[in-house]
Structure formats: structure tokens, C-alpha cells
């Protein structure tokens, strides 16, 4: 049996990036994925993901965003495929709401180029949107979207080209670690390695059960609507958007293909007890909320839905990621709880995981994502 330097469980956004950075550093890598590469069962699918510096979640993410922009561009060059498209990002909400006030904190902390939109000309400038009475808006010109499945496949394919072994259809049942290395057991095989990285998404609590991580998996519905005209076309300069209204936060993308305009709700969702048993059909609750949002704020969309999908958010109590070494096994590192805003960071998180696995430390600024932070210890 071949022994690898590092085994990676899960080859979605984070695991695929970890495999890539490990292989770049010359490690002998084994990547194990229970589905196919770029599958639609977890969190890294649905066509597109936003990448932005307008970070309301916490200013500490900004150095990681900057690193990620650069690293996605580097991967584009290596894979010779387009991954990022700049469209601009429009945020709308109450002036004192958590989204706009959070973005302004990040803007002040990092001198970001984010514009306060003149609301007197809002309707002319953004004809596809109804801001609503008393709302404000911010615009980030350099934000855009990543083609999510293409990004996942690019990381994994590049890792293969650099010598990584990638096995799909491998559902991990258990792993163990001791002073001599790690053992990973799947339904059909057994693998050994010196080190282990766990990037299991919605399956993280199961594969890291000894840590009793405070994770909640949520089912999130996304759907595409037919527009009335071309005001949402990316070719006409339509932006990505996020709208905070009545304590909820909705987001969407311009029309990129025949499916129309993609929308979803970042808040809300249904708790998932078993990630292997997710209702992926339409639910009245989702359809009602999304239809109400469209009627109120997207006047150029029809109610006709062309496509639906479901993805998983793995939430932490503070909605910040967990990226750390296992406190009991120094050969094991993991990343979990990306809380619906993690994909854009995949390359820098992957680099940090590779560092932690190979060196036991990283220079990437991820200290605020530690398992030992107060907000997790209190749960």
C-alpha cells in the first residue's frame, strides 16, 4: 500500500485548494472525495459565488480577501481558464443595519474603494432594483463572481498534474492518528499517510465527532428567474447584489445564461440533521420568501422560475470559520463552518491548511479563525 505525505478528506472548495497547495510544495498527496469533483451535494456548486472586499462580517477577513483575489488570478493563469468576472457589487439596506454598517467598518479599517450611492439618482443608475423607502446603498466596483464548479475542478486538476492521487466515490467511515501517522478507512479501502487534512463541509461534525464542534447545517434554496428585459444582463453592466430588508438578507447575480437571474436568501434556511438526507425539492417556505423579495425589490423579474438547486451552509455560532490543528492529534488539521461566505477564500485557506499540515504553522492571517476563540469556547 502506498503511503502518502498528506491525505485530504473532501475535495470541494477548501479540500481541493489544500490538495493543490500541498502538491505545489512537492508533497505526495492523496485526495479522497465521496462524490464527483464539482458535485452538487454540498456547498461548492450552483454556478457562481461572490467575491468582494465589502465585508460586513468582520474587517479581519480583508487581508484574506486580498490574498484570495491574487491567488485566484494565479490559478487562472496556471489552469488557463477564466474563473473570475468583475461586475461590481450593489449593497442595499437600512443605513444603520448590520450589512451597510459592517461594510463601512471594513471600509474605514482598510481604506476600501467602496462608494456611497446617491439615492436621488438610484433608480436611473440601477433600474433593476427597488431600494425601498428610507434605504441606503453602497457600491464596490471591483467585486465580481467566481465560477464555482470550474474553480473546484481547476484546483483538483492542477493538483493531479503535479502528482496528487485523486480518488472519487470514496466515503470515509473513520480515521485514526497516532505518533506514527494516520489511517483513513473508506467503505472499500484503507489508506495511510503521515498527515491528514479534513475538509468535510456538512459532514464535518460526523468526521470530527470527538471535537464536538458547535456546527449547524442549514439547507439553502437558490432559484433562477426569467427577466422581463435586458436590465439584468451582465453585458449591460448589471451588478451582483445584496439587499437587507426586515432583518433578512437576500443576494443575487445578473443574468449570465439562459436560466436568468439567480437569487437566494443568505439568512433563514432549514436545519439539516443528516447531510445524506437533504430535501432537494422545492419547499413552499422558500418559494414564498423568494417570490416576496422579487416582487418588492426586483421589478424587472417575472415570477417564472427556470431552475432550482439546494446547497448546504455549515454554520458556527459566530458565523466565522474554524481553521486549526486538531488539539489532540498534531498530525491532523481541519477547516469547517464556513457559514455561507467561505468559498471566495478557498485558495488562501488551502494554502494555510497546507502550511499547518507540513510545517505546523502558517503565516496566513487566520488567527481569528482558531478553534480556541472565546465565541466557540462559550458554547
Image (cartoon, helix red, strand yellow):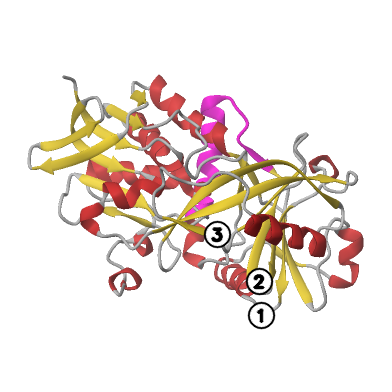
- 373 lies above or below 155: below
Q: Give the residue at x 78% y 58%.
A: 294
The stretch drawn in magenta includes residue 72: yes
Q: Position of residue 153 (x, y in %)?
A: 50, 29
| Residue 100: mark | 2
Q: Position of residue 141 (x, y in %)?
A: 72, 54
View extreme (left): residue: 179
Q: Nearer the viewer, residue 329 or 340?
A: 340
Q: Give the residue at x 63% y 73%.
A: 247
Contact (Cβ within 8 Å) of mark 2 with mark 1 = yes
Q: Residues within 10 Å of mark 2 (few under 14, many from 20)?
A: many
Q: CA distance from mark 2 to mark 3?
A: 22 Å
Q: Dot 3 corresponds to which residue?
A: 269
Q: CA distance from mark 3 to mark 1?
A: 24 Å
Per the rendered image, the range of residues in magenta is 64-85
Q: Is residue 211 visible?
A: yes
Is 249 on the left or on the right of 377, as rendered?
right
Q: Nearer the viewer, residue 179 or 9?
A: 9
The stretch drawn in magenta includes residue 356: no
- 73 lies above or below 292: above
Q: Dot 1 corresponds to which residue?
A: 96
Is 356 on the left or on the right of 313, as rendered?
left
Amino acid at each position: 500500500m502506498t503511503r502518502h505525505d498528506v491525505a485530504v478528506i473532501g475535495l470541494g472548495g477548501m479540500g481541493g485548494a489544500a490538495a493543490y497547495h500541498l502538491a505545489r510544495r512537492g508533497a505526495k498527496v492523496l485526495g479522497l472525495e465521496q462524490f464527483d469533483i464539482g458535485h452538487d451535494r454540498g456547498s461548492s456548486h450552483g454556478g457562481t459565488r461572490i467575491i468582494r472586499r465589502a465585508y460586513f462580517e468582520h474587517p479581519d477577513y480583508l487581508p484574506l480577501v486580498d490574498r484570495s483575489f491574487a491567488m485566484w488570478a494565479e490559478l487562472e493563469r496556471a489552469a488557463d481558464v477564466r474563473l473570475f468576472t468583475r461586475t461590481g457589487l450593489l449593497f442595499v439596506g437600512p443605513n444603520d443595519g448590520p450589512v451597510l454598517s459592517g461594510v463601512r467598518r471594513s471600509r474605514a479599517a482598510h481604506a476600501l474603494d467602496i462608494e456611497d450611492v446617491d439615492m436621488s439618482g438610484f433608480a436611473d443608475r440601477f433600474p433593476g432594483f427597488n431600494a425601498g423607502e428610507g434605504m441606503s446603498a453602497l457600491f464596490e466596483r471591483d467585486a465580481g463572481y467566481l465560477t464555482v464548479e470550474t474553480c473546484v475542478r481547476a484546483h483538483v486538476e492542477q493538483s493531479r498534474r503535479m502528482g496528487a492521487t485523486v480518488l472519487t466515490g470514496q466515503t470515509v467511515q473513520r480515521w485514526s492518528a497516532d505518533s506514527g501517522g494516520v489511517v483513513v478507512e473508506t467503505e472499500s479501502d484503507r489508506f495511510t499517510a503521515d498527515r491528514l487534512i479534513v475538509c468535510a463541509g456538512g459532514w464535518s461534525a460526523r468526521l470530527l465527532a470527538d471535537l464536538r464542534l458547535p456546527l449547524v447545517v442549514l439547507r439553502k434554496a437558490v432559484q433562477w428567474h426569467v427577466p422581463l428585459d435586458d436590465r439584468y444582463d451582465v453585458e449591460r453592466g448589471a451588478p451582483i447584489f445584496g439587499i437587507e430588508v426586515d432583518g433578512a438578507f437576500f443576494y443575487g447575480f445578473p443574468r449570465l445564461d439562459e436560466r436568468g437571474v439567480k437569487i437566494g436568501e443568505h439568512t433563514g434556511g432549514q436545519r439539516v440533521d443528516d447531510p445524506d438526507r437533504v430535501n432537494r425539492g422545492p419547499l413552499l417556505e422558500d418559494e414564498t420568501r423568494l417570490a416576496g423579495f422579487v416582487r418588492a425589490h426586483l421589478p424587472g423579474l417575472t415570477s417564472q422560475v427556470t431552475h432550482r438547486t439546494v446547497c448546504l451552509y455549515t454554520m458556527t455560532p459566530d458565523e466565522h470559520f474554524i481553521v486549526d490543528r486538531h488539539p489532540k492529534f498534531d498530525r491532523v488539521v481541519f477547516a469547517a463552518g464556513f457559514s455561507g461566505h467561505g468559498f471566495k477564500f478557498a485558495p488562501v485557506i488551502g494554502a494555510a491548511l497546507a502550511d499547518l499540515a507540513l510545517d505546523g504553522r502558517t503565516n496566513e492571517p487566520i488567527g481569528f479563525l482558531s478553534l480556541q476563540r472565546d465565541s466557540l469556547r462559550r458554547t
